[in-house]
Amino acid sequence: MDRRRLSLLLALIAGLVLFGTLGYRVLEGWAWLDCVFMTVMTLTTVGYGSPGPLGTDGKVFSTLLMLVGIGLMLYLLTLLAETVVRGLTDPLAVRRRKERKLIHLRGHTVVCGYGQVGEAVCVALRGARKDVVVIDHRPEHLEWAQGQGIHTLVGDATDEDVLRRAGAERAESLVTVINSDPSNLYVVLSAKGLNPALRVIARASDESAAQKMRRAGADEVVNPYQLSGNRIAAMMLAPRLSRLLSGDVTSDHFIIREISVPDTLVGQTVEALGRETGALIVAIWRGGQPIRCRAGDVLQADDTVLVAGAAAEVDAVEGHRAVGGSAAGGSVAGGSGAGVQPT
């Protein structure tokens, strides 16, 4: 309704300017630009002075123009102020502005559920400068995420329409860590239905739920309780290795990073790449399986390499990736301390 009134009011003012211009042209015979100038000056009450002497008819016409024009201008300013204030404070308008920003996102990550696990995921992804959209049905849980510059969407992640509004069809990956196995299972089914190429990582509380999620299309399923237990055991058995692989150690002298092999490195041997950059190729991930690499192994398309070395050496390998493509990678022990970190 405000937009309709605003459009009508702007049309009235335009008509009033046209009417005033024609009136001065007929009554005073001034040039067209002088008539427009006098009309706008009268309506805005600036008072620079008329382009020429005003006759009696011109003075009467100016008086009527001022009486009508000032009222319209005041009403227009009031309506503009009201529209601006309402746009800044109205929850529905705020939500629409947020969702308009989501339309332009591509290759982002959707995180469903913003509890302790969801918050940790978002911190790690933001540390890697990834665009993140968080979905949660509790607005109060999203306040901190908004303060960190994370895109948020209030709604039920099991609703396909909510996933669509979060850009699941254009996203690179989706993480569902809702504290409910049925909800996570439903999110996996809905997300894969919207975007079969979407990489989906789901949380499960037991192996039975994990199997169902894998059958539903989840690429990876994580049990946080089992993961915590494994981490504690690893810290007891190999504390230094555990800290290194979990990203708790930050050092420029030694880091491990996962890098997808770009076109510029396809056909190059592991020995040649190591000699050029000084980095150590620890392993090659090929066809879904890790392979212990040897000096003469040739890098192939779709390979992922695990690279270790000083930060500058690993960055040199990363430089090939920046030229050859934008595949996702990750870093360990040289990143933000948030575990395996995409680059």
Image (cartoon, helix red, strand yellow):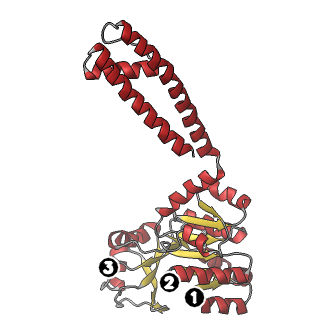
Residue 256 visible in this rendered orientation of the protein: no
Residue 340 visible in this rendered orientation of the protein: yes
The percent position of residue 260, horizontal first and vertical second, equals 42, 79
Label 3 or label 1, whichever comes before in sequence order: 1
* Structural distance between the alpha carbons of marks 1 and 2: 9 Å
The percent position of residue 206, horizontal first and vertical second, equals 74, 88
Amino acid on which the number 1 mark rests in the picture: Gly
The percent position of residue 27, horizontal first and vertical second, equals 31, 15
Q: Nearer the viewer, mark 2 or mark 3?
A: 2
**Is the residue marked by circle 2 packed among few (<14), some (14-19), or many (20+) residues within 10 Å?**
few
Label 1 or label 2, whichever comes before in sequence order: 2
The percent position of residue 146, horizontal first and vertical second, equals 63, 56
Q: Looking at this view, is 90 or 257 the one in front? A: 90
21 in relation to 318, above or below: above
| Residue found at x 53% / y 24% | 71
**Is the residue marked by circle 1 packed among few (<14), some (14-19), or many (20+) residues within 10 Å?**
many
Q: Residue beneath label 2, please? A: 196
**Is the residue marked by circle 3 packed among few (<14), some (14-19), or many (20+) residues within 10 Å?**
some
Q: Looking at this view, is 224 or 293 the one in front? A: 224
| Residue found at x 64% / y 74% | 159
Q: Quadrant of residue 303?
A: bottom left
* Structural distance between the alpha carbons of marks 3 and 1: 29 Å
